[in-house]
Image (cartoon, rainbow, N blue to C red):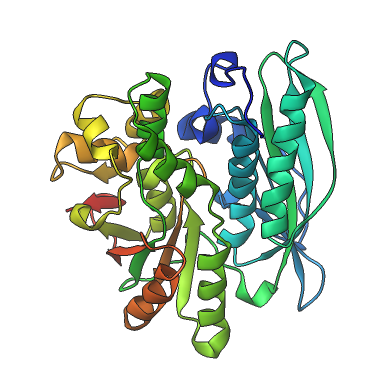
Amino acid sequence: MHQSPLNLLSSCTSGGCGAKLGPGDLADILASMEVKGDPALLVGFGGRDDAAIYRIDDERALVSTVDFFSPMVNDPFLFGKIAAANALSDVYAMGGKPLFALNLSCFPEKLDRAILTDILAGGAAKALEADTVIAGGHSIFDHEPKYGLAVTGVVDPRRILRNDTCKAGDALILTKPLGVGLVMAALRAGEAAEALIKAATDSMERLNRWAAEKMIALNASGGGYVHACTDITGFGLAVHASEMAGGNHTLVIDGASLPLLPGALGFAESFYATAAGQRNRNYMAGKADVSALPPALQELVFDPQTSGGLLIAVVPEAARELCGAINRDDPAAAIIGEVVEREDAAVLLV
């Protein structure tokens, strides 16, 4: 009922989080910005974290994020669900709960308005699943369709989860499989079977809410077991892992433990690739050592993810318990490595 006879993919040159600016270009651009300081701003863009956090009082802080992109699937309703799940994910990665969201839409005048109706309906359906209110939004005409959300949430300022506060000895949990970019590249080429496409889109539209709630509950039990968290999106596992490592740690990741989408490794072996994946690889030159992996698996480490999983750094004695709890809703979740004191590279694949 929500299918469109028009091909959304043909109306845009790139889609999903693979359309993001490269991490190197983005860092250069942000470095030139001058912004007002505010002691209530607990997390800004300076740390390259997943969302901004602004303290209201000792028990409440606002979490604010925005994310939108062009389609990676032809079904507008499904596109809306994926884009909304992706935007909501940043709040979950900070340990927060989303409260309300604003729609952001760009839409070509030449396309049927019913397509936009379906995109917004998909976003609303995912927001409803997240117990989040759609409170309004903004729409403009554009040459390519784009959709996403600006999301506001709440978090206890004493329990914020940053992306770069891991500790040596932590175990690493990845909650969703890798390979979305490669499967979507094969879709565009007409080479991906329906079952493989469905596995990828099911993963993209699945909220990180359920994994985040288990992570937050573990921390609320009083142990402070989870030290850091981020979500894996267009910069791929390697770049996001390097951000978690910061300047003091190395993330050692077991390539054999990485959860992968069905067909993704085969597409990599068939030399499918993405421009965003190559940008990620270029950026990580000298920062990630992937030499122990076969070339196809290396491609998965740099592959841009749209609405990817959470990467969680947790004390090793709680890792199996947390991963097991997450597995009830996210069966692909796996322990993929550990945090050690800084070695030569920020990320080491073994």
Q: Position of residue 105 (x, y in %)?
A: 75, 31
Residue 175 in the image: above or below residue 125: below
User: Is residue 316 among the parts visible in the rendering?
Assistant: yes
Q: What's the residue at 68%, 38% (across, down)?
A: 148
- Name the outermost residue toward the front: 1
Q: What's the residue at 74%, 41% (across, down)?
A: 121
User: Is residue 32 among the parts visible in the rendering?
Assistant: no
Q: Is residue 233 left or right of residue 194?
A: right
Q: In this rendered view, identify the residue nearer to me: 341 or 97.
A: 97
Q: In this rendered view, identify the residue nearer to me: 53 or 311.
A: 311
Q: Position of residue 57 (x, y in %)?
A: 81, 74
Q: Residue 320 falls in which quadrant of the image?
A: bottom left
Q: Position of residue 30 (x, y in %)?
A: 61, 35
Q: What's the residue at 21%, 26% (across, down)?
A: 270
Residue 88 in the image: above or below residue 54: above
Q: What's the residue at 34%, 72% (across, down)?
A: 170
Q: Position of residue 299 (x, y in %)?
A: 27, 35
Q: In this rendered view, identify the residue nearer to me: 103 or 165.
A: 103
Q: Is residue 104 left or right of residue 160?
A: right
- Name the outermost residue toward the top: 110
- Name the outermost residue toward the bottom: 222
Q: Residue 300 falls in which quadrant of the image?
A: top left
Q: Is residue 151 left or right of residue 333?
A: right
Q: Quadrant of the N terminus?
A: top right
Q: How many marks?
A: 0
